[in-house]
Image (cartoon, rainbow, N blue to C red):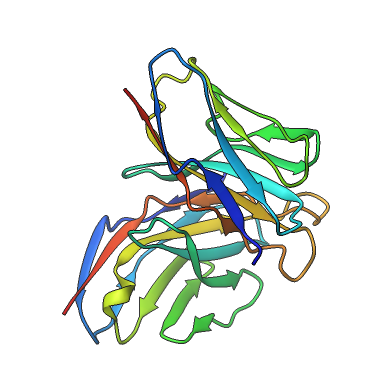
Amino acid sequence: AQTVTQSQPEMSVQEAETVTLSCTYDTSESNYYLFWYKQPPSRQMILVIRQEAYKQQNATENRFSVNFQKAAKSFSLKISDSQLGDTAMYFCAFMKPAAGGTSYGKLTFGQGTILTVHP
Amino acid sequence: DGGITQSPKYLFRKEGQNVTLSCEQNLNHDAMYWYRQDPGQGLRLIYYSQIVNDFQKGDIAEGYSVSREKKESFPLTVTSAQKNPTAFYLCASTTFRAPKNTEAFFGQGTRLTVV
């Protein structure tokens, strides 16, 4: 079974600065996907960024980037130029392909990190 | 616009009662999922269904039941056997069709409180 660990229950950052959220995971799979989801106070889950394990290049989406270290099973999220709207709970999540490759979707989540951006 | 609708947004249950949470999607997605969210524990998978009339237990299925009679609908019943049902419940869906088959869409959730 997979496990995902986020060791930072809460983080804070000043507006316009950079913050990094940590995530480690454990799996015996060689092919899988990793995600960061954002859950703002509205509680709507929003996909921030996705990383495919077989791709060595780190994923980036505008101000969001990851540092994916497959051997270390580490997947951190860097938020640059933090904005007040980035205040949210952030979840790291793991997805493995189901047998036969036709059915994805089951996610294993970490405990979450509450990020507060201060003006 | 396509999406996932969960209802109600807030639900109150007396001890010993069964309650059903609704989840409907118009994304033509194949698979649907129910997650439970508790403070400090992230989201945990309750049940999932990859095809109509079939579903599988997730990590915390005890005290819950589901049905999948239609592709669009995946209701969750919280039974009286669930000892600590107060939580936030999220429904999600995914398609089997690449390249979008790794992206999960979530509803806005139902907050269930036992009174």
> Picture coordinates of residue A33 (x, y %)?
61, 63
Q: Residue at x 48, y 53 (%)?
A: B108
Front residue of this view, candidates B82 and A110: B82
Q: Residue at x 71, y 59 (%)?
A: B27
Q: For residue B50, say whether it is visible.
A: yes
Front residue of this view, candidates A8 and A28: A8
> Picture coordinates of residue A5 (x, y %)?
40, 53
Front residue of this view, candidates A26 and B94: B94
Q: Residue at x 34, y 85 (%)?
A: A80
Q: Is residue B38 left or right of residue B5?
A: left
Q: Is residue A93 left or right of residue B70?
A: left
The N terminus of chain B: image quadrant: bottom right
> Picture coordinates of residue B10 (x, y %)?
40, 39
Q: Residue at x 20, y 75 (%)?
A: A13
> In terms of image quadrants, where is residue B13?
top left
Q: For residue A72, say whether it is visible.
A: no
The C terminus of chain B: image quadrant: top left
